[in-house]
Amino acid sequence: MKRWLIAGGVVLVLFAALVVVTALLPDSPDRMAGSITNPRPDGVRALGQVLAADGVQVTQVTSLDEAIRAGSGATLAVYLGDELSDAALARLSDVPADLVVVHAGGSPLDSVLSLTDGLVSSDYWWANDEHPRAGCTDPDASAAGTLTPATVGLYAESDRVMTCFVGEEDTALYADASTNRHRVTVIAGGAWLRNDTITREGNAALALRVFGRHPSLVWYLPGADALATTNQSDDPGTGIDAFSLLPPWSRPVLAVLLVAGAAAALWRGRRFGALVKENLPVEVPASEVSSGLARLYRQGGSRGHAAAGLRAATVHRVAGRLGLPANASPELVVQRLAEAGDEPPERVRALCYGPPPSSDTDLVELATALTDLERKVSSSD
Amino acid sequence: MAISGRLPLLLVIGVVPVIAWPAPLTVLGWVLLVIAAGALDLLLAVRPDRLRIVRELPGSVRLTESVTSRLTVTNPERRTARLQLRDAWPPSAQPAADRPQVVLPAGEARRQATRLTPTRRGDLAAAAVTVRSFGPLGLVARQKSLAVPGVLRVLPEFRSRAHLPYRLARLRELDGQAAVHVRGQGTEFDSLREYAIGDDVRSIDWRASARATRTMVRTWRPERDRHILVVLDSSRWAAGRIGGTNGIPDQLRFDTGIEVCLLMAALGAASGDRMSLLVADQRVRLRLPGGGKGSVLARFANGLSPIEPSLTETDWSLVAGEVDQLCRQRSLVILVTGLDPALYADGLGTVLARLGHDHQVLVAHVTDPAETTRLTDAATATDVYDAAAGARLWLATQALAGRVSRMGVEVVQRDPDHLAPAVCDAYLALKAAGRL
């Protein structure tokens, strides 16, 4: 029993350790939406593999430092799912490589504005058009012809911006502009280049042309170092270090207390010598025969047998007290019992020599009556 | 190795320097400092196996009484030893868990007592003595378990000794020490003395009176130097647990049998009879022929204490052979066993018939108080079936008892508390009747 408890405890601890380790490990890029190595429906691996087959060198990065290393003659694709920090935006704006911004989520409005030097802004709404047409002179967009629509739209803030797939109220899905450092292409929505949608409409054509402009593509999925942490009011638990609120010595003191706790566990846990075993004698419940017999009677419903036993035992017990011989006739027994117990002889005869009871209730009544009779006879003298 | 509570305390004190210089190096430094102090302490601690430990233990104790096991520890080293000792015993010995720290200067000896109150009959073997030897700082101890053998024999409780004085008084009445000088059955000639007024004239010995020229009377006393053999069944029947209700203590049937043996030993020895004891199931567990030296009661108690019943059936032909060897003359054979139809068919019947021919046999049967409880008014069907089964078994036992009685065998059936005195009363009655 104890061995099983220990084994169970070990398994539980191992399981807990596994859960903790899994929770602490960072998400693999292979599982993140918009990752170029993610083969799931929300990944972009199909595009990456086709581009690689066409001779484009595709690399995926998640840190800002690696992303800004992309030199001129390369394409830096920024997959924007969330707002980026100001510092990250400033560094990305200085990158010599051409930028392709995938405006995947709904919130990074300021980031789009900042990355295009204020040339392109975005809105939460585009149009109710299912099959938007390019309708512009941009070679990439016109080659695609149609595109899967997005839920966000782009505005051109300047004449220098080429917009395509224009819907109602001048919002577009595709915007192309050049800043003084590099060319910036912004495409609204992340739903058009995913593994499950890349083959629809003209998505594949647009993606291959835009991301294959240069022989090298750096696919940047912004990690924790680039994301803005301005949403503290919504979720104070993330991003803020609890130790920053405590005195500087709190971490070392915690370490000391942990070590002391471990030492205390050792102090209390060390056994003062081995346990001593006890040799126990064998024991059998003495009434095992009786209770087994009782259960057999009950299961077999042998009320007659049980009643006969009770009657015979009662007569046997009172026989000695009443001076009855062992071979006394029923008449003599009934007569003596009726005299001693002050009961009518018919009733005594029915009790001691009557028919077997027909139900358990009758049996209980008979047993109780026999006990009463015996008590009367015993107390009469 | 074991650490004391001072070590974690010392580590906690490390909070002070860490607050003063909050750096990881301070933590590491403090922990290393404590470890170094602990290592030094461990090195300076006296090795437990250098100590000399001697145990003092009484040989035996009666169940429910307490004894003290004493350990004398001598420190032959030139350093002072700081010790904590645990004298380990099985749980049924109920060792008191008081383990003070002992400071033992070089060359001196100290004694530590552990009080034991055994709750189980038999031989209790002491387990190891565990020694914790702390260093001078009291941080770390060397721990080692040393074998210091010792065996404590726990004798049966002999609860029925309360019934002994009354039986001894009865015996003295029979024995002629009281004024009962009546010639009759069950008496033997004791001595001649001068006639005193009031003596029965029928006891005047005329031949001796003629020789002595004074009127002499014969005095009589009950038979002495009879042989009594108690046979205790240690089979599966004896392993039955009875009691626990109606104020009767929870016990095995075997324990009741031991009470019978001990009370009979005390009474039989006082009446001058030779007492033998046989405990058997499939094999002979104990064989104590009469006529040995020392107190019969002590021999019986000592011999019976380590025996536990086994889950086997009794080999009755083996018992009959042993009885033949032990009883050269006509004896009283007291069989402590169950009057159970199954046991009877198993060989007890034939043995009883044979033994009853050669000896006076008495069967002592202990009843289970649980089986004789009467029905109450609030009985359920289950209770009634239980009572019916109990009644059936009781009837079978009564039928068997009647059959055995007709063979000339005495039968005593009582509950566990009253069996031993009842057997003694039957013995005294047999003695008074001269049937031994």
Image (cartoon, helix red, strand yellow):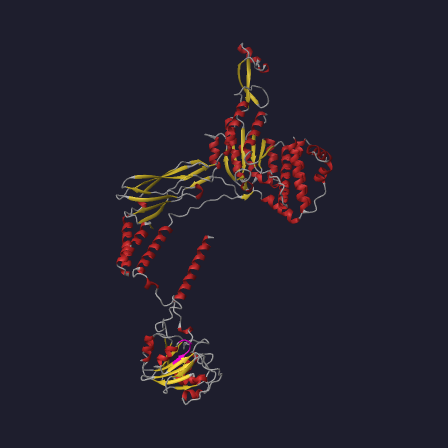
Which quarter of the rendered picture does the C terminus of chain A lie within? top right
Residue B226, how many percent across, how many down?
54, 27
For the point 42% across and 73% down, the residue is: A31
Q: Is residue A164 visible?
A: yes
A260 falls in the magenta region: no
Q: Is residue A380 left or right of residue A105?
A: right
Any part of residue A59 in sight: no
| Foreground pick, A141 / B257 | A141
Which region is colored magenta? A101-107
* Residue A13, x across and y down, in percent: 42, 59
Residue at (30, 61) in percent of width and height: A247
Q: Looking at this view, is B124 or A343 the one in front?
A: A343
In the picture as drawn, the residue positioned furthest to the bottom comes out as A137
Using the rendered view, name the quadrant where residue B350 is placed.
top right
| Furthest residue toward front | A169
The quarter of the picture where residue A105 lies is bottom left
Judging depth in this view, the residue of B180 and A312 nearest the camera is A312
Task: Count the numbered circles shown.
Answer: 0
Residue B136, x across and y down, in percent: 27, 47
Q: Quadrant of residue A72?
A: bottom left
Quick check: B325 above or below A155?
above
Q: Nearer the viewer, residue B414 or A367?
A: A367
* Magenta-span inclusion, residue A102: yes
| Vertical placement of residue B21 versus B267, above or below | below
Percent across and percent down for residue A237 are 38, 66
Q: Is residue A297 left or right of residue A79?
A: right
